[in-house]
Image (cartoon, rainbow, N blue to C red):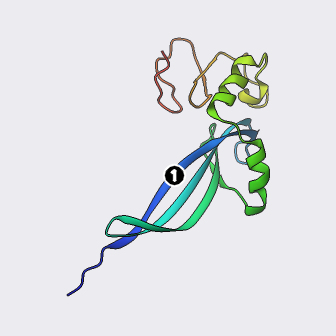
């Protein structure tokens, strides 16, 4: 009698960040660029990859959008690392791109992890849960 254990496993990688207008919530803000890879497994050992997709995730409304194959090269040219995004936020006098369409009040503080605007006195980011202080 033969018994084979097989299945699949998903691997998720954060590739970086990009700023753009969200098609769902219509705010201009930061999107994380995520990649999902699926591998076929035998006896819990990944053998070969059979799927690879990229997604943009809006940090405002958390909606995700799959990146079309023809848009991947353009996205790769515009992508920023966490350090580049943090530097942009720190050095921007008016981070209008990080505060939606400009209708919010003057910017306060931003989470170093997800760039969500946080109020004074907050200990944890309400967006990603990172400890702020």
On screen, residue 65 versus residue 37, left or right, reads right
Against 50, residue 87 (above or below) is: above
Residue on which the image places disc 1: 12
The residue furthest left is: 1
SS under mark 1: strand
Q: Report which quarter residue 90 is drawn in.
A: top right
Q: Position of residue 13 (x, y in %)?
A: 54, 48
Query: What x and y, as percent, mark residue 17?
Result: 67, 39
Q: How crowded is mark 1: few (under 14 residues within 10 Å), some or many (20 or more)?
A: few
**Residue at screen point 31% across, 69% down:** 43
Looking at the image, which is closer to me, 78 or 108?
78
Residue 122 vs 24, above or below: the answer is above
Expressed as whole percent of the image width and height from the top left, the position of residue 7 reads 39, 71
Residue 97 appears at what percent x and percent y?
A: 77, 30
In the rendered image, the quadrant that contains the N terminus is: bottom left
Q: Which residue is drawn at 72% across and 42% down?
A: 79
Which residue is found at the position 73% from the left and 25% from the top? 88
Q: Is residue 54 above or below residue 50?
A: above
Q: Quadrant of residue 8?
A: bottom left
Residue under the point 73% across and 44% down: 22
Q: Which of 12 and 120 is in front in this view?
A: 12
Q: In this view, does 57 lie to the left or right of 3?
A: right
**In the drawing, does residue 98 fall left or right of residue 53?**
right
């Amino acid at each position: 009698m033969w018994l084979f254990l097989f299945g699949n496993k998903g691997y998720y990688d954060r590739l970086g960040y990009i700023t753009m207008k969200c098609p769902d919530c219509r705010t201009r803000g930061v999107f994380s660029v995520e990649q999902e890879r699926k591998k076929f497994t035998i006896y819990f050992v990944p053998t070969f990859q059979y799927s690879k997709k990229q997604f943009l995730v809006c940090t405002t409304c958390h909606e995700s959008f799959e990146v079309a194959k023809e848009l991947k090269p353009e996205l790769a040219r515009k992508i920023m690392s966490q350090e580049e995004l943090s530097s942009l936020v720190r050095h921007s006098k008016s981070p209008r791109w990080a505060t939606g369409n400009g209708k919010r009040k003057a910017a306060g503080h931003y989470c170093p992890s997800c760039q969500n605007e946080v109020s004074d006195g907050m200990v944890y980011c309400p967006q990603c849960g990172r400890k702020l202080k």
